[in-house]
Amino acid sequence: MARYFKEQDIDEFRECFYLFARSGQITSLDELTVIMRSLGMSPTIQELAGYLKGKGGKMSFADFLEVMHIHSRAENLPSEVVNAFKAGDPNKTGVISAKQLRTLLQKWGEGLSAREVDNIFREANVSNSATVRYEDFVKIACAPVPDYY
């Protein structure tokens, strides 16, 4: 799997893997979730459970690299999300009301809590009465979580 990633990426993956999988293996869905999302991936709970089950409930670093390769090839989240917004934008305005966006984030897919939406809106400088350029919003919402160490 190393041939699919740059050495710098593998180093980042390794650091994150061993930070959260202290036993040297991923043994829980929570560990896999935190590690992949910390690395900027956005897998669903079903995808994560499938990856872990496919590895017999335990995942070594080599197994994790394989999962990262498979998932990174399948995931192009920002463009998928923008395309979904475009499909729901018959007039091609490029904007959505904050109220509509809040409803979508709370009701569709793995719905977010009101607090989670408030946090996203605060991070993206969205007021509840505003309209939102969905391409700009997606860039902010899908950006990797910054390192604070």
Image: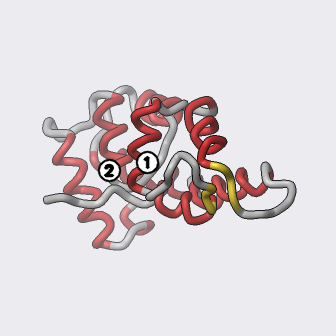
Quadrant of res 31:
top left
Instruction: Give the residue displayed 71% in from the left and 53% down from the top.
Output: 85
Circle number at residue 38: 2
Side (left or right) of 17 relative to 40: left
Of tags 1 and 2, the one toward the viewer is 1
- The location of residue 34, given as percent across then percent down, is 31, 41
Q: Residues within 10 Å of mark 1 (few under 14, many from 20)?
A: some
- The location of residue 38, given as percent across then percent down, is 32, 50
Q: Quadrant of the C terminus?
A: bottom left
Q: Residues within 10 Å of mark 2 (few under 14, many from 20)?
A: some
Q: Amino acid at mark 1?
A: Ile
Quadrant of res 144:
bottom left
Q: Nearer the viewer, residue 61 or 107?
A: 107
| Between discs 1 and 2, the one toward the N terminus | 2
- The location of residue 14, given as percent across then percent down, is 23, 56
User: Where is mark 1, residue-wise?
Assistant: 120
Instruction: Give the residue displayed 46% in from the left and 30% down from the top.
Output: 113
Q: Quadrant of the N terminus?
A: bottom left
Instruction: Give the residue displayed 63% in from the left and 38% down from the top.
Output: 104
Side (left or right) of 128 relative to 4: right
